[in-house]
Amino acid sequence: MDHATSRAVETAAAALAKAEALLITAGAGIGVDSGLPDFRGDEGFWKAYPPLAKLGISFVDMANPFWFGRDPELAWGFYGHRLALYRATTPHPGFGILRSWAAGMPRGSFVFTSNVDGQFQAAGFPKSSILECHGSIAHLQCTRPCRQEIWPGHELEVAVDPETFRAAPPLPSCPACGALARPNVLMFNDWQWIPHRSSEQERRFETWLDEAGEGRLVIVELGAGTGVPTVRLNSERIARSRRGTLIRINLREPQVPPNQIGIACGALEALQKIDDLLG
């Protein structure tokens, strides 16, 4: 860790020591230290899914509801494999550090994440304090959709061939009409995503922000890149509107607006360094 990064860590620790409310915002990069694959760029994605590399299908291409109609076995192979991977993954110790910080905030805390993997819930964060803006892979909806309903898929098992990454029938189906089901995840070019679950989470989030009021707010953002900038833009918007301090932890893209804190480091290393200073 170079001098500039060390100074940024010290500044972050000082801000957290004075904080009254904590907003944790996270993108896919927070999961790398847990062993989850880095889908950054086509090469990272294809390393995780070699059969898709042979077909020349990128992450952006694959994360599209189009495939549930054209090739449902391939679509559910991709999402079924990810579902099993997330279930088998243990959140890294950085999640525990974040929980300990959150527990000490007099005005409480909230999580805003674009991740669909359920890792914050697995790490013990209360479901009532998490906003999953892109939905959840552990929840399902109808592909049609025949009605505006979302149901839990916690018991769902999808058999996926590890060589081809294709799913074997029977594929998940809608309990109402029998049509193919899909994850309740916001994909690219997705006009059929049912947003009700995430919208309810958003209402709880806005209520928490209002209740936090003028308390000193610190936003700790982890692993959120510019490729899909939802998390970064929201972190900056909230920091600006609530006069909060943004701590952006990002190994490759730590740039921040003026007077905010950027730490060019992986999530776990940065959290441990900050926590050491907090004692």
Image: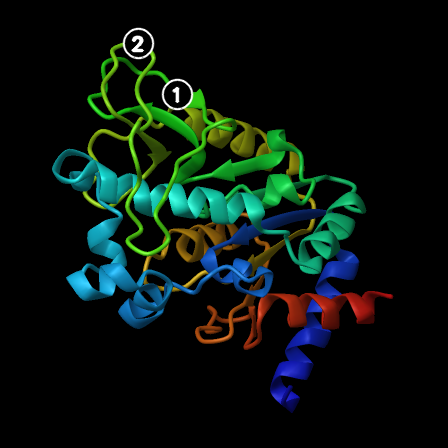
Q: Image point 56% across, 67% down: which residue?
A: 249
Mark linked to residue 176:
2
Q: Could you say which is closer to the camera, residue 10 or residue 58?
A: 58
Quarter occupied by residue 177: top left
Q: Secondary structure at mark 1?
A: loop
Q: Could you say which is closer to the camera, residue 217 or residue 29?
A: 29
Mark linked to residue 150:
1
Q: Is residue 9 above or below residue 203?
A: below
Q: Amino acid at mark 2?
A: Ala
Residue 24 at x, y percent in the picture: 60, 50
Residue 167 at x, y percent in the picture: 31, 40
Q: Secondary structure at mark 2?
A: loop
Within 10 Å of disc 1 (Cα), the crowding (few <14, some 14-19, many 20+) is some
- Is residue 110 visible in the rendered image? The answer is no
Q: Earlier in the sequence, mark 1 or mark 2?
A: 1
Decide if residue 101 is on the left or right side of residue 255: right
Residue 214 at x, y percent in the picture: 65, 43
